[in-house]
Image (cartoon, rainbow, N blue to C red):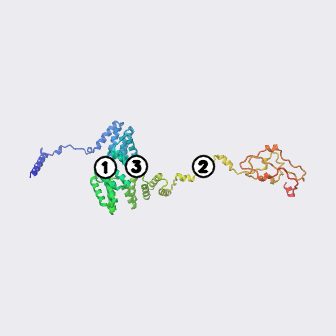
Amino acid sequence: MKWSFFLTVCSFVIFCTQFSCGGKSKEANIPKVDRVMLDATKPKLEKLNEVILNNPENPVNYFLRAKIYCEIGDYAKGLKDINQAILLDDSQAKFYFLLARINYQRKEKIPAIKAAEKAKNLGNKEAGLFILLGKLYMETGDFDKAQAYIARAAEIAPYHAAVFYLESLNMLHTGDTTNALAKLRKAVSKKPGFPEPYSLTALLYLKRNKPDSALFFVGQGFENTGNSAPLFFANGEIMENLGFKVASLASYENAAKADSSYLPVALRLGKYYFNKQDFSKAGRYLNRYFIADSGNQTVNLLFAEVLAKGGDDEKAISVYERVLRADASNPEAKKALELLYVAHGKQVPQSKEEAAKKTPLPSTNPVSTKSLKTVVEKPSKVSPKDTIKPGLETKTKKISRDTTKVVPNDTTEVGKPVKIPEKKDSGRSGKKPVPTESANQKNKMQLKKEPAAEATDSLNKIQDKPRRGRKKNKSQENND
């Protein structure tokens, strides 16, 4: 009774206070607030824009504006501002740390690692920096470095939820699921609004064939963190495992709506619609993956195949070429690319190895082209005139054909004078035999140097002195 009377009195007092002063409400005296001003980032951005316009050489103002852009998710403008800040002053560790965070959100892992390492080298010892480095090296597959940075983060912030989460990932890499689950529970207890530990815990229980436990953690995650892509994706996995395909597809679609850059669901939906022969939707989801992470060649091959079957041959060719630049021996990419080139009338590009096989090896003999041409020149026949001085042709005209015919032979030394045998008269003509040239004349005569012209062996076998005691028959005389 006392409490009810007290409440009645209080209500009456409040009523009288609100409707006093002629029965007019005090709401009329409350000034209206601009809804734009309720957004804390708007006035800050306007103020920083004015400050930067008046003083464009101060790097801190660019840094502060980049932080605001990062908070509202405009990473392109944030990247531009933080790069300008570093251009003006490259000695600040916090500038590089913010650059690493922005690149991580943009899925640019290698630039993020370089910026984070630079921040560490400049003296930044925040736990968040080591947590980021642990994530980056784990996602790029360098688990040794990831473990080292996670350990450093644990030394600085041993009860940080992200530290527990990264430790669980490292344990899963080694196959220790029991301790990984224990770490995930600690991460959930330290930061209930952290969605990834809930989803990962649910998937681990699903692998243990415990869908009820998995659904419990998904429900807790939705209750504590709200709608998030990892939780929708985990719920889709559970529904698919239980055979509820329609519910599973709806969960995957909700995950893609919650975060279009969430790569696991982009790949899952890309494969789903590819199997359904819906290449338009498959290409849309795989394109998200390709933009965020173009280094996964397995996904790139699937994306290129989807593009080719969907009719976008030009983009399919560019994706296949990207795969071959990363792995020139990929047979699937080479075969598909050859078919696309032939279909469009383009020349199939060759790798350096294939081009080398078809190109003749250069000669190792340092002979000039001119000398090679001289060597292979067709040899010409040498007539006896080349060995006799001008004016003596009439004297050697009656030499037998068998003795004057010269056939090229490789055994005779080029440039050596060839002896012409003496021809003795048979005695019937009454004329004395024509004497051969003297030794001095022979030394003066030289053969003309031609590449392959040489004397024959038969000519060398002819005796230097004329034969005696043999008479020629009538046919020989006629030949003479």
Q: Is residue 228 above or below residue 127?
A: below
Which comes sooner in the sequence, label 1 or label 3? 3
Does residue 33 appear in the picture of this structure?
yes
Q: Of circles 2 and 3, which is in front? A: 3
Mark 3 highlights which residue? Answer: 144
Q: Who comes first in sequence, dot 2 or dot 3?
A: 3
Where's residue 439, x and y in %?
Answer: 82, 44
What residue does disc 1 label?
161
| Residue type at the position of mark 3 | Asp
- Alpha carbon separation for disc pair 1 and 3: 21 Å
Q: Nearer the viewer, mark 1 or mark 2?
A: 1
Image spot of residue 338 (x, y percent): 50, 57
Spatial separation of the CA atoms under disc 1 and disc 2: 66 Å
Residue 27 versus residue 101: which sits nearer the camera?
101
Question: For the residue labelled by badge 2, is the local secondary structure a helix, a strand or a loop?
Answer: loop
Write the residue at 71% across / 48% down.
Answer: 451
Q: Mark 2 belongs to which amino acid?
A: Pro
The local crowd at label 1, few if under 14, some if 14 to 19, many if 20 or more residues have their Cα within 10 Å, is many
Pointer 2 residue: 362
Q: Relative to 437, is 367 on the left or the right? A: left
Q: Earlier in the sequence, mark 1 or mark 2?
A: 1
- Is label 1 in a helix, a strand or a loop? helix
**Residue 431 on image: x %, y %:** 89, 50
Q: How many other residues sit within 10 Å of disc 3, few (<14), some (14-19) or many (≥20)?
A: few
Q: Amino acid at mark 1?
A: Ala
Element under disc 3: helix
